[in-house]
Amino acid sequence: FVPIQWVITYRLKNERKWHKLIPHSSVFQADTFVIYKDEKYYIFYEELKFKDYHGYLIVGELDIKNNVLINKKVILEQDCHLSYPNVFEENGIYYMIPESAQACSIDLYECTSFPYSWQKKQTLIDNICAVDTTPLKTNDAWYLFTSEKLKGAGGNEELTIYKSTHLFNKPFKKLYKNPVVTDVTNARMGGH
């Protein structure tokens, strides 16, 4: 029995060909977020070891010429499983909201030295078992789209939205009593 190995694939804008970045056979890679900065592509992703199914977060630079990730480094590892390193920029600062459902919180990390150093800034929502939280900023508000693992739902079936008037200083409140989507085919977020 061989586990299914997820790999990172990419293609350049004016190409049709997809390129695969094949990791060591003992791990899989998933949940990529790409940041283009200083003429380099930085790939943030989850890596998971098959032996213990423990996910942690890594960043590497994409070397397009040689089709490899270079300067790879673990940027966040905890006792709980981590995935979905949702990296975004706000006012010139990079932030990340990783999926950490086992920790029962949605946490915000701030990049202190791009791309390798990250520090927890604050917990956005506590006492929640949520996966793949994705922020969206509009004119006067921040929204968090997330899939909660509720009784009878495993994290893929329902989408809930939380809102705050400020990313840091105001609490996030659930917008609706019930999930806005209840459908296993399209409720879970998949990136920006």
Image (cartoon, helix red, strand yellow):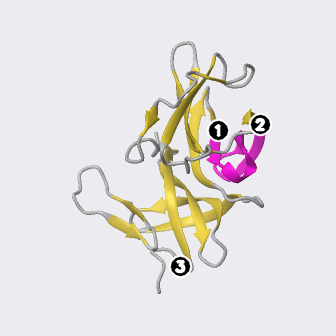
Assign the magenta stretch its main secondary structure.
strand
Distance, label 2 to label 1, CA atoms, is 9 Å
Q: Where does label 2 land, which residue? A: 121
Distance, label 3 to label 2, CA atoms, is 33 Å
Which numbered disc flags the more N-terminal residue, 3 or 2? 3
Q: Which mark is residue 95?
A: 1
Disc 2: CA contacts within 10 A as few (<14), some (14-19) or many (>=20): some
Q: Which mark is residue 24?
A: 3
Front position in the image: 133 or 67: 133
Quarter of image, res 21: bottom left
Q: Is residue 85 left or right of residue 171?
A: left
Which numbered disc flags the more N-terminal residue, 1 or 3? 3
Asked if 112 appears above or below 53 in the picture, the reply is above
Q: Position of residue 89 (x, y in %)?
A: 58, 34
Can residue 20 be found in the magenta stretch?
no
Residue at the image point whose x is 64% and y is 79% from the top:
51
> In this view, which residue lies farthest toward the front?
152
Q: Position of residue 55 (x, y in %)?
A: 64, 63
Q: Which residues are magenta?
A: 95-121
